[in-house]
Image (tube, grey):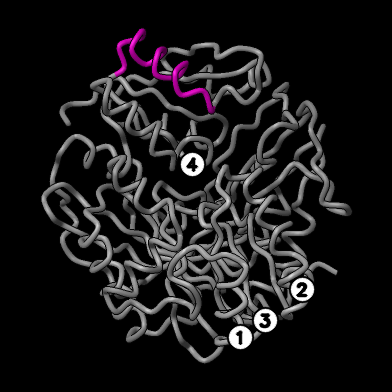
């Protein structure tokens, strides 16, 4: 801990630019890193310094190289953003061991919470509901036994999975027998771990997450919930805050769950407690995200709190000045993620941006890394921008977002804007009648 005067951002694109903007506001110098694929990215230009990682597009995962750059340039801190190494305990420990400030939870907490079954076990011990299933990784025999007890269908999940990957719906004992070893090998290849666990499949669930801040002085603040039920293959597409379905009583209970868990594990900095809500209004904790989330702007828009700024202040050892959890909101915000992909096939659409025109309206925010001549590479997540709209009501926010997306023009690459508009103008979304399985129904 200590004063941060130069910060290296171990990331790229939109989130790198987002972090740089807050650093400029705080008078902190910024250091960007980039690969050959990102030589045209604006985050290089607006940072105070930029260092080349090399030709390998996946060098953003090179712990030793990034630490070497941080030490060489005199950075005092590292912010990992989201994705890449943001939830990597080895990277966090390397940052800490080299005398740099890590903007995130301690490495030992990341390591503990990397295991989703460990999160389930801890939550269960604290009286926080988890989806019925195993509390530890299982083999095939154990999976069969638990599946018979809780009933099919079940979910087979990677213990150390992420980004919505490593999840299979299993509908019968025969399917479990046939797919278990195949699924384990796939997950081992993707996540370098062959550990899996099993839980009851809850149809038409809603995805509700809580934004948490915790400092080193024992203070924990919950900045409300976000509804993230519009998902494609378990990856979020549209998010909003607050949720249109969470009641005040439910919100208060979720705040208690989140605060209890965070204090128990010694969590520090920003984090997200992710729950699913059954059609019967039962909440179950499913995982903890140990970083800033892609969808953090909707929380910022309804609370007027800069979460990146809070992350930095917490990392410096400062005490949170936000003392009370917020239960009442007088605003509503909705975010749409824009992907560089063909709206007809959902396949990535890399290329060079030849024209871009942004929406410009009160209450509309665009986080992006777009400008003329920028190359959108095929190697990374295809998200190129996020459009966030805020209003006094959900209807007002939704109308603003729809209009903003209609005004957003990008040429040179195809985008998912037509798909987003179809979802946002659907009867189900307008009425808030959504769940994590509804995406295909809305876009067909």
Asked whether, in this view, residue 62 is left or right of residue 121, the answer is: right
Disc 4 crowd, CA 10 A, few/some/many (<14, 14-19, 20+)? some
Question: Which residue does the numbered mark 2 point to in the structure image?
Answer: 175
Disc 3 crowd, CA 10 A, few/some/many (<14, 14-19, 20+)? some
- Does the magenta run of residues contain 67? yes
Tell us which disc is closer to us: 4 or 1.
1
Q: Main secondary structure of the magenta part?
A: helix
Disc 1 crowd, CA 10 A, few/some/many (<14, 14-19, 20+)? some
Q: Residue furthest right?
A: 344
For marks 2 and 1 on the same chain, the one whose residue lies earlier in the sequence: 1
The answer to whether any part of residue 332 appears in the image is: no
Relative to 15, does residue 351 appear above or below in the rendering?
Answer: above
Range drawn in magenta: 61-75
- Whole-angstrom CA distance, mark 4 to mark 1, is 37 Å
Q: Which mark is residue 270?
A: none
For marks 1 and 3 on the same chain, the one whose residue lies earlier in the sequence: 1
The total number of labels drawn is 4
Q: Which mark is residue 82?
A: 4
- Whole-angstrom CA distance, mark 1 to mark 3, is 10 Å
Question: Which residue does the numbered mark 1 point to in the structure image?
Answer: 148
Question: Which residue does the numbered mark 3 point to in the structure image?
Answer: 153
Secondary structure beneath disc 3?
loop
Residue 114, image x, y percentages: 42, 51
Asked whether, in this view, residue 224 is left or right of residue 46, the answer is: left
């Amino acid at each position: 801990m200590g004063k941060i005067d130069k910060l290296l951002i171990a990331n790229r694109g939109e989130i790198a630019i987002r972090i740089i903007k807050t650093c400029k506001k705080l008078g902190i110098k910024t250091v960007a890193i980039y690969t050959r694929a990102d030589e045209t990215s604006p985050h290089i230009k607006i940072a105070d310094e930029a260092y080349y990682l090399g030709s390998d597009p996946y060098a953003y995962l090179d712990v030793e190289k990034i630490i070497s750059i941080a030490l060489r340039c005199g950075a005092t801190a590292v912010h990992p953003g989201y994705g890449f190494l943001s939830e990597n305990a080895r990277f966090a420990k390397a940052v800490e061991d080299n005398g740099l400030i890590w903007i995130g939870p301690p490495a030992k907490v990341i390591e503990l919470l990397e295991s989703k079954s460990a999160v389930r076990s801890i939550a269960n011990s604290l009286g926080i509901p988890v989806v019925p299933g195993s509390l530890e990784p299982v083999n095939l025999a154990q999976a069969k036994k638990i599946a018979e007890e809780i009933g099919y269908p079940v979910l087979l999940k990677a213990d150390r999975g992420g980004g919505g990957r490593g999840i299979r719906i299993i509908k019968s004992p025969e399917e479990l027998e046939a797919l278990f070893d195949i699924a384990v090998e796939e997950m081992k290849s993707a996540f370098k771990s062959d550990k899996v666990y099993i839980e009851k499949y809850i149809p038409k669930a809603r995805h509700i997450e809580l934004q948490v801040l915790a400092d080193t002085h024992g203070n924990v603040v919950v900045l409300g919930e976000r509804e993230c039920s519009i998902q494609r293959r378990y990856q979020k597409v549209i998010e909003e805050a607050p949720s249109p379905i969470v009641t005040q009583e439910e919100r208060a209970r979720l705040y208690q769950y989140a605060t209890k868990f965070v204090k128990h594990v010694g969590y520090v900095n920003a984090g997200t407690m992710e729950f699913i809500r059954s059609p019967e209004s039962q909440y179950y904790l499913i995982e903890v995200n140990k970083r800033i989330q892609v969808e953090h702007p909707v929380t910022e828009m309804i609370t007027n709190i800069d979460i990146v700024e809070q992350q930095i202040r917490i990392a410096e050892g400062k005490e949170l000045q936000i003392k009370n959890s917020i239960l009442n909101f007088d605003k509503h915000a909705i975010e749409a993620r824009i992907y560089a992909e063909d709206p007809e096939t959902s396949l990535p659409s890399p290329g060079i941006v030849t024209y871009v025109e942004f929406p410009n309206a009160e209450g509309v925010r665009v986080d992006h890394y777009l400008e003329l001549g920028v190359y959108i590479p095929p190697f990374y997540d295809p998200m190129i921008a996020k459009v966030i709209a805020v209003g006094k009501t959900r209807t007002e926010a939704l109308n603003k977002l729809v209009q903003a997306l209609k005004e957003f023009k990008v040429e040179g690459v195809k985008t998912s804007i037509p798909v987003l508009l179809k979802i946002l103008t659907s009867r189900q979304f307008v009425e808030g009648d959504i769940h994590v399985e509804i995406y295909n129904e809305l876009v067909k």
